[in-house]
Amino acid sequence: MKIINSTPRADGFYMPAEFSPHYGCIMIFPERSDSWQYGGYAARRAFVNVAEAISRSEHLTVCASRRQYENARHMLPDNIRVVEMSSNDAWARDYAPTFVTDGKDIRGINWGFNAWGGLEDGLYSPWDLDDKMARKLCDLYEKDMYDLGNFILEGGSIHVDGEGTCITTEACLLSKGRNPMLTKAEIENYLRDYLNVEKVIWLKNGIFNDETNEHVDNICAFVKPSEVVLAWTDDENDPQYAMSKSCYDILSRETDAKGRSITVHKLRCPKPVTITAEECGGLDTMDFQPTRTPGERLAASYVNFYIANDAVIMPFFGDPADEPARDLLMELFPEREVIPVYARDILIGGGNIHCITQQIPVFGGAE
Ligand code: KQY
């Protein structure tokens, strides 16, 4: 593996859309007891359900700590590769490499990672093990890497259509805890050069109370070129309404990199999901402080799904909106099976299925 000192744009590499063919996927086994209630037992079961569903249609590698290696190997089916790799938590979307392709081979991008805001408003410290994962994974897959460690970005804060368009949120990318010394134009230039896109669509917001400073992957996702799903509520008294409406208005008047207008499918959220006192009681403290408080609203959204080769793995919350959300995704992905996974135990950690997965595009010579 070597570090490449140019940019994907200069080399003819670009980030393909998630709905393009994959070689496989990367996940990380959950463990930390201030993120995952009751020592992570229920979260591990939910991760295993997601992993099992993904592994039906593509290669999957799950990284596990030395403490969890044996348990992961025992809980995961044999067709899933388990490798021992240290991390601070389990958000593969955010710190596994973002892969780019030239149509023949793939390369990884290592963005800087500071736990969603560093000392400004980050979610834990230290984060050094997470920050090293992209490089370790490029080594593991024997893929060269663009090292952009001085630019803070998480994979969950970008979505691309693979045809020149990126969607992101201002709330996240312009937040004080990431790259405060850069202007919006400078940040956009990094996206253009490293994702190799021509157009960046800036939404203002994401999901209400999303502790990542409102990652785009919880509010909006491409389902095909020029078509997105947008997390939605019809309840005008819900603080989510104005946030989703702002996104809707921006997307409705925007065009993509190829000049096409964008079709927006409203994917209605579940009723507000809040954490219970019992769930909070199962979370260890961090720096002597509770990580969640009873009644706190969690950032529940059906948009946080993963598109595998033959399936879409989506979160269910035990809400009446579960089935209508599945019906819409089945309509939008007629070639794929839509597989629901009960995901409350992932949501309690602060993200969902998309946040715990990172796709690897197909590359020449891969089987
Ligand atoms: O949603 C994500 N991409 C990560 C959320 C991290 C939450 C840490 N508690």
Image: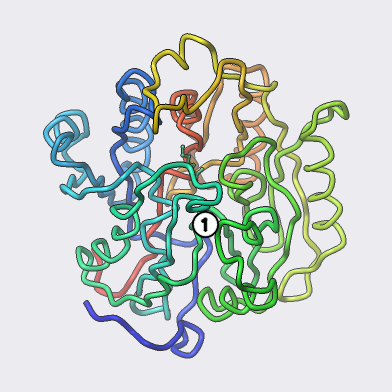
Closer-to-camera residue (171/300): 171
Closer-to-camera residue (197/151): 151
Give the residue at the far front of this rendering.
Answer: 288
Q: Is residue 112 left or right of residue 214?
A: left
Residue 68: x and y in percent read: 18, 34
- Rendered image quadrant of residue 102: bottom left
Give the mark count. Answer: 1
Q: Is residue 118 left or right of residue 82?
A: right
Residue 148: x and y in percent read: 42, 74
- Colour setup of the view: rainbow
Q: State the quadrant of the C terminus.
A: bottom left
Residue 275: x and y in percent read: 55, 18
Q: Residue at x 51, y 62 (%)?
A: 153
Q: Residue at x 60, y 71 (%)?
A: 181
Q: State the quadrant of the N terminus.
A: bottom left
Q: Is residue 182 above or below residue 227?
A: below
Q: Residue at x 52, y 57 (%)?
A: 19
Residue 347: x and y in percent read: 50, 30
* Crowd tier of the residue under label 1, counting other residues whose Cα lies within 10 Å: few below 14, some 14–19, many 20 or above: many
- Rendered image quadrant of residue 11: bottom left
Give the residue at the far top of this rendering.
Answer: 278
Label 1 amino acid? Phe
Q: Is residue 332 above or below residue 173?
A: above
User: Circle 1 sits on which residue?
Assistant: 19
SS for tag 1? loop
